[in-house]
Amino acid sequence: MGKQTRKHIIVFFILILCLCTLASTVPAADDVALSINMLQGEQQTRFNKSVFVAGVWQYVNITMNQISDELSLRFYKGITLTTGNKNETNYYEWKYDKNNITVWNDVSGYGIEYIKQDSCFKNNTLYSFCIGIKDAMPNIVDYFENWTVEVSKDGTTIHSESIVVEKPKTGISLSKPSSIIFYVDPFTIMDAQGDNFFKIGNIGNVPLYVNIDYEKYNDIEITDLNKKFLPDDIATHYVIVHSRSWPPGIKRMDIQVNGSYPRSYFVDTNATVTLYTSFIIDVPQLVVYVGHSNYRIDEIQGTGITFQYLEKLNMYEGEIKDISAYVSGNGAVTVDVSADEKNISALKLYDGNTETRSPISFTSTNTSERTIIVTVEALGEGKTGILTYKVSSDGVIKTYTTQITLGPPASPDKGTSANPGFIMQIIVIIVVLLVVIYMVLSYVKNRMR
């Protein structure tokens, strides 16, 4: 091996040794991982970058490949560190120092501690800064800025990445009908689900709490309430009414659902104080029909009397049917029942189980229903019969009608008679089959001879 070659080899090994030494003294950026989350782990991204919300306490979590006794964290607006005046609109710095009396510190120098020292923690190679920055951003909807976060160790930057800093935003989306309707049987303890639903969404960048006071509204239950809504969360809410053996009538419930943002999340500044107050979320009115299925319910105004009746039904010519109506509420009532006697005829009238004659007078109560039954006969098809109720109480008279559509007479049972043509077809088929079988047997017999 020549002298020149040996020199080249020595120089090569010296270069390799220098590179290894340099690599061991300068930490690689890939050795540091950084994440941002709010107090209960909520994370957000924008443009594939981590989001930091101004005016809100958040954790900046730094995970390293080795333990360090000293670590610095810097936020600054833009992609390069400002050389001009540093203030709360463009620069913040915090420090972890194991050997300092106060381990976690805000060293920005603004006279306000933008760090929650008691909430910061270290776990092996994880360093978690609980920090905030002032909401000094313009009052513009969806306003954001591009900032840079830097991590330094022993005065050397070991990690840097771009983040999005957003102005705190609150707001809800609400999709709902004007009312949700329920049907409940009279004097029955039961649960009834409404015929519709409503949706609430969090369109802000701060967690939202939606609650209802179930001690105040103990007759209802709404799914997915009394919980936290993360940003962009949308929940569908179904309502269940718990009937307490209610008397007949129409109950209208106006309820209030409360929205709020957790005060503990916000850095106490003038810009965030207005976000602490709770607010009312407008939800649909609940309308509960307590009555018999398919019956019209009418609360006779000024009397306290409720009358239930069928508005329409169908009968066929010659059919006889019992038709019921119901009276409830407190007070003296008179009910005059009549049929048109042209298209339908009222054969009998019952007050409960007792046959009687019209008009019927009685004292109604709010703890039971009075049942009035009319036995009606349909007289002729193709017409509409009218059954009339004239209800009077406390000087108020109301008239109600049941329209009965009359169809043709009921068809006789098809199973009691057979179609002669069909029977003849069956006989012909049987005869043909017998002839064919006879011919086949004869042919086979002749071949065997």
Image: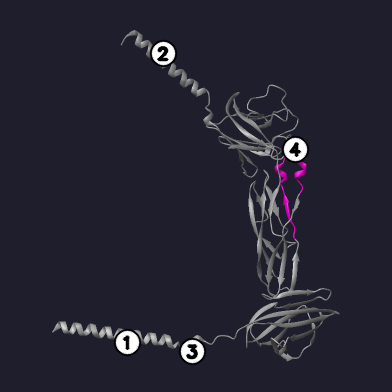
Q: Amino acid at mark 3?
A: Thr
Q: Residue at x 66, y 39 (%)?
A: 58
Q: Position of residue 13 (x, y in %)?
A: 41, 16
Chain part drawn in magenta: 255-277
Q: Left or right: 72 with respect to 66?
A: right
Say which label, 1 or 3, has the lower sequence index. 3
Residue at which label 4 appears:
139
Residue 189 is drawn in which quadrant? bottom right
Residue closest to the eye, 16 or 117: 16
Task: Give yes or no for residue 194 being in the magenta stretch.
Answer: no
Q: Residue at x 73, y 23 (%)?
A: 85
Residue at which label 2 appears:
11
- Disc 1 is placed on an element classified as helix
Say which label, 4 or 3, has the lower sequence index. 4
How far apart in space, not on screen, are marks 4 and 1 (Cα)?
Answer: 97 Å
How far apart in space, not on screen, are marks 4 and 3 (Cα)?
Answer: 85 Å
Residue 329 is drawn in which quadrant? bottom right
Position of 88 relative to 317 (above/below): above
How far apart in space, not on screen, are marks 1 and 3 (Cα)?
Answer: 26 Å
Q: Residue at x 73, y 45 (%)?
A: 263
Q: Position of residue 69 (x, y in %)?
A: 59, 29
Of circles 4 and 2, the one toward us is 4
Position of 144 relative to 246 (above/below): above
Q: Left or right: 44 with respect to 370?
A: left
Residue at which label 3 appears:
416
Q: Left or right: 79 with respect to 28?
A: right
